[in-house]
Image: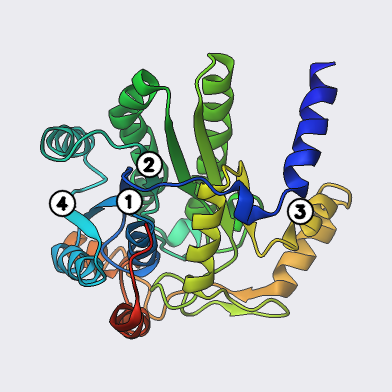
């Protein structure tokens, strides 16, 4: 009976135009990890235009300063902190500082991500550990840092930026796909746990196809499906957040393909994926035998690298944008 009620409620809710379903985030404190560039910067700008107080975390101090500058130039409120998401204690310490200096975070967007794009046996152990630390383990630590305040207020929203690679495996992305599968599971399990305890705290998992101009998948050779515009992805994430959507697959029509994945033999799925994604690789993959550890860390693409195109778009938008509370 309860399942039928939930089904009917979901159908009715889906029929309501999105513009009437969107919640206000004016005055909310929103933290964006990986906000020093790329998708994180775009999300920060959009959140601030909607009246949110934005807090940016990143390992790239120069990127943080640029994001803060752009948000403030657009009339928003933004604070930036250097935070190493591979360091659990640093996450906890920075969370404590934010609570003391700014207030309680009510919107948490786990956006930061790294990728190696090498075959499993060619990937150094420490780089696999780093991928898991940034792409999934940090979700645990940020949730443990900010969720108690949300539970106390019985209000909040946690957004996990995963990937379509968290719903289907891709060659040369074994560690990345594993971390994104985990992010999808993290979101669903956390949501079920919070719902079972009666909390009114929302979670949303974002599963986009490969995004261009973020520095992570510039060399992806994709057939039939175009790589996504970061601006379009950022807009879709904000819509999913404001509408309290449980998940957002980008582009939406790929939901049908995911259903078909479980209807056809695994061999068919593998052949289809190889046909769509011809190649995923970096221009110059780091070598375990010739590259030092510091050089390897710098060479791993993150969401805040190679953002010249996005920076130009932002500069044009900031000059003509108005804050929308």
**Residue at (36% x, 32% y) in the render:** 143
- The reply to whether callout 4 and callout 2 are in contact (CB within 8 Å) is no
Res 228 label: none
**Quadrant of the frame with the C terminus:** bottom left
Q: Would you name the residue on which mark 1 appears?
A: 52
Task: Name the residue located 38 percent from the left edge and 51 percent from the top edge.
Answer: 131
Local secondary structure at mark 2: strand
Marks 3 and 1, how far apart in space?
34 Å
Whether the residues at callouts 1 and 2 have beta carbons within 8 Å, the answer is yes
Q: Is residue 2 left or right of residue 29?
A: right
- The CA span between labels 3 and 4 is 38 Å
The correct choice, above or below, for 314 with respect to 127 in the image is below
Going from N to C along the chain, the mark reached first, 3 or 4, is 4
Question: Marks 4 and 1, how far apart in space?
Answer: 17 Å
Q: Earlier in the sequence, mark 4 or mark 2?
A: 4
> Residue 81 bears which disc, if any?
4
Residue 189 placed where, x, y %? 56, 28
Give the side of residue 161 with respect to residue 57, left or right: right
Q: Residues within 10 Å of mark 4 (few under 14, many from 20)?
A: many
Label 2 sits on residue:
107
- Which residue was labeled with disc 3? 258
Say if mark 3 contacts mark 4, CB within 8 Å.
no
């Amino acid at each position: 009976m309860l399942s039928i009620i939930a089904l009917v409620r979901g159908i009715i809710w889906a029929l309501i135009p999105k513009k009437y379903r969107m919640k206000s985030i004016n005055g909310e404190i929103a933290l964006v990890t990986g906000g020093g560039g790329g998708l994180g910067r775009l999300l920060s700008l959009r959140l601030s235009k909607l009246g949110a107080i934005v807090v940016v975390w990143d390992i790239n101090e120069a990127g943080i300063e640029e994001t803060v500058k752009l948000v403030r130039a657009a009339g928003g409120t933004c604070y930036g902190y250097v935070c190493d998401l591979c360091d659990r204690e640093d996450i906890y310490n920075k969370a404590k500082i934010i609570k003391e200096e700014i207030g309680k975070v009510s919107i948490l967007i786990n956006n930061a991500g790294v990728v190696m794009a090498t075959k499993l046996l060619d990937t150094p152990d420490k780089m696999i550990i780093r991928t898991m630390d940034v792409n999934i383990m940090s979700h645990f630590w940020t949730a443990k840092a900010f969720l108690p305040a949300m539970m106390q207020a019985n209000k909040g929203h946690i957004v996990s930026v995963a990937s379509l690679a968290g719903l289907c495996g891709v060659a040369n992305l074994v560690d990345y796909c594993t971390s994104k599968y985990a992010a999808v599971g993290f979101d669903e399990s956390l949501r079920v746990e919070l719902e079972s305890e009666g909390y009114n705290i929302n979670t949303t998992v974002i599963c986009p196809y490969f995004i261009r101009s973020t520095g992570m998948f510039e060399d992806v050779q994709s057939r039939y499906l175009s790589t996504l515009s970061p601006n379009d992805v950022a807009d879709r994430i904000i819509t999913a957040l404001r509408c309290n959507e449980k998940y957002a697959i980008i582009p939406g029509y790929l939901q049908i393909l995911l259903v078909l994945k479980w209807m056809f033999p695994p061999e068919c799925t593998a052949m289809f994926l190889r046909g769509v994604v011809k190649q995923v690789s970096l221009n110059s993959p780091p070598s375990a035998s010739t590259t030092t550890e510091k050089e390897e860390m710098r060479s791993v693409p993150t969401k805040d690298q190679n953002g010249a195109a996005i920076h130009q778009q932002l500069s044009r938008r900031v000059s003509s944008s108005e804050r929308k509370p």
